[in-house]
């Protein structure tokens, strides 16, 4: 059986990917420092799949902790999610983001190299495209960033590309995904950020369940149909399946590939809000605020390459994403405990 190390495996995307991995027949080992997640997630994964992943509470900055994982397990491949992920926060504390997301990742890659594990699926982001000149965005677009978070993703891509060029035994799939939302259909797994959410749908969810008074809409003067930012929202279960497809592709190919994971459809902030109102059955209050630094107007994917190389495409639309998010919110008003 192929054993996969999932860094950040108790996080939002990581936990859903662990479910997909187990259901696809992989043996899963999870590394997480629980900075923005909860160990109880492991029990939820077990409820869904019947299997509890082996868990190490450690940090990618801890080289001894990484070595221990590779010494105690025969790791065949790594899916790397671990990292800080809030665009706005990265503008405020850039050094924290560079230390964790760059230094920690290099630490992981060096450990993989030393233990002869040379297959990696990396959690990248559409932020590497910066402010694109046109949409949809394909993988051959120029890359540049508008915030430190995006810069850490782009730097990791360059590091991993250089690594593959230096050693032809490496296989790296750089998955540039767009905006994951939704939750597992069981209602057992979903997004539970600490504190006030930075991302749109978790914020809307807390407005819907009464924990927050209204949604803050950051700008309504963008060159979009309703003036609010347009993004490509993808169901987290679709995203998790994309990682399985990437692993299967990696097993048969060498070198590095950059691949978008998105739906290829853009929805504005207000369109997402109205879809969520439909899901929860009530009108939700919002207020227009000034634009946030680092945000861009429109961003959605060209998904042709994912279909061609991975045989993958998204299955779920915005209504299903919001329905599953609301189902999780209703069943877990206080998060995952």
Image: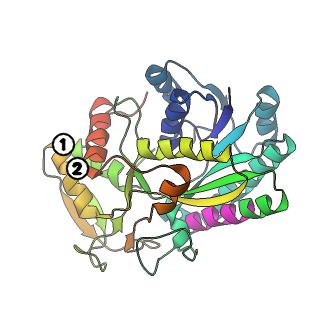
Secondary element at image label 1: helix
The overriding secondary structure of the stretch rendered in magenta is: helix
Secondary element at image label 2: helix
Q: Nearer the viewer, residue 33 or 259?
A: 259
* Residue pictured at 57% horizontal, 37% vertical: 9
Q: Give the range drawn in magenta.
A: 148-159
129 shown above or below 39? below
Q: Magenta stretch containing residue 155, yes or no?
A: yes
Q: Which labelled disc corresponds to residue 276?
A: 2
Q: Tell me if I can see residue 81 in this picture.
A: no
244 shown above or below 130? above
Marks 1 and 2 close (CB-CB < 8 Å): yes
The local crowd at label 1, few if under 14, some if 14 to 19, many if 20 or more residues have their Cα within 10 Å, is some
Which color scheme did the rendering employ for the protein?
rainbow
Q: Nearer the viewer, residue 169 or 30?
A: 169
**Residue under numbered circle 1:** 280
* Residue pictured at 17% horizontal, 53% vertical: 284
Q: Magenta stretch containing residue 242, yes or no?
A: no
Q: Which residue lies furthest to the top in this view?
A: 50
Q: Which of 212 and 50 is in front in this view?
A: 50
* Residue pictured at 66% horizontal, 62% vertical: 157
- Place of residue 63 in the rendered image (x, y in percent of width and height, measured from the top left): 80, 43
* Residue pictured at 45% horizontal, 73% vertical: 293
Name the image quarter holding residue 112: top right
For the C terminus, which image quadrant?
A: top left
The local crowd at label 2, few if under 14, some if 14 to 19, many if 20 or more residues have their Cα within 10 Å, is many
Q: Tell me if I can see residue 311 in this picture.
A: yes
Q: Which labelled disc corresponds to residue 108?
A: none
């Amino acid at each position: 059986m192929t054993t996969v190390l999932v860094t950040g495996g108790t996080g939002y995307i990581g936990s859903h990917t662990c479910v997909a991995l187990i259901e696809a027949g992989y043996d899963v080992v999870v590394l997480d420092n629980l900075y923005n997640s909860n160990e109880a997630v492991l029990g939820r994964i077990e409820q869904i799949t019947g299997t509890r992943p082996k868990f190490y509470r450690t940090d990618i900055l801890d080289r001894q902790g990484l070595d221990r994982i590779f010494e105690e397990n025969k790791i065949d491949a790594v899916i790397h999610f671990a990292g800080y992920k809030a665009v706005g926060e990265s503008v405020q504390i850039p050094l924290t983001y560079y230390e964790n997301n760059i230094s920690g990742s290099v630490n992981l890659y060096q450990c993989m190299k030393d233990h002869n594990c040379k297959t990696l699926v990396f959690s990248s982001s559409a932020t590497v495209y910066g402010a694109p000149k046109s949409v949809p965005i394909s993988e051959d677009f120029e890359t540049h960033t508008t915030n430190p978070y995006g810069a850490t993703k782009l730097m990791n891509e360059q590091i991993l590309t250089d690594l593959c060029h230096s050693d032809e035994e490496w296989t790296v799939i750089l998955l540039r995904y767009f905006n994951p939302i939704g939750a597992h259909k069981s209602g057992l797994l979903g997004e539970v950020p600490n504190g006030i959410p930075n991302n749109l749908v978790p914020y809307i969810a807390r407005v819907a369940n009464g924990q927050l008074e209204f949604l803050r809409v950051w700008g309504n003067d963008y060159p979009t149909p309703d003036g609010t930012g347009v993004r490509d929202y993808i169901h987290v279960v679709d995203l998790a399946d994309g990682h399985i497809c990437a692993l299967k592709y990696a097993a048969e190919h060498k070198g590095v590939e950059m691949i978008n994971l998105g739906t290829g459809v853009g929805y504005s902030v207000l369109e997402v809000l109205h879809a969520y109102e439909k899901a929860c059955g009530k009108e939700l209050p919002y207020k227009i605020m000034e634009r946030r630094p680092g945000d861009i107007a429109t961003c959605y994917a060209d998904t042709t390459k994912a279909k061609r190389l991975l045989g993958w495409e998204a299955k779920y639309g915005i209504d299903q994403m919001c329905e599953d998010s609301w189902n999780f919110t209703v069943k877990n008003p206080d998060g995952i405990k």
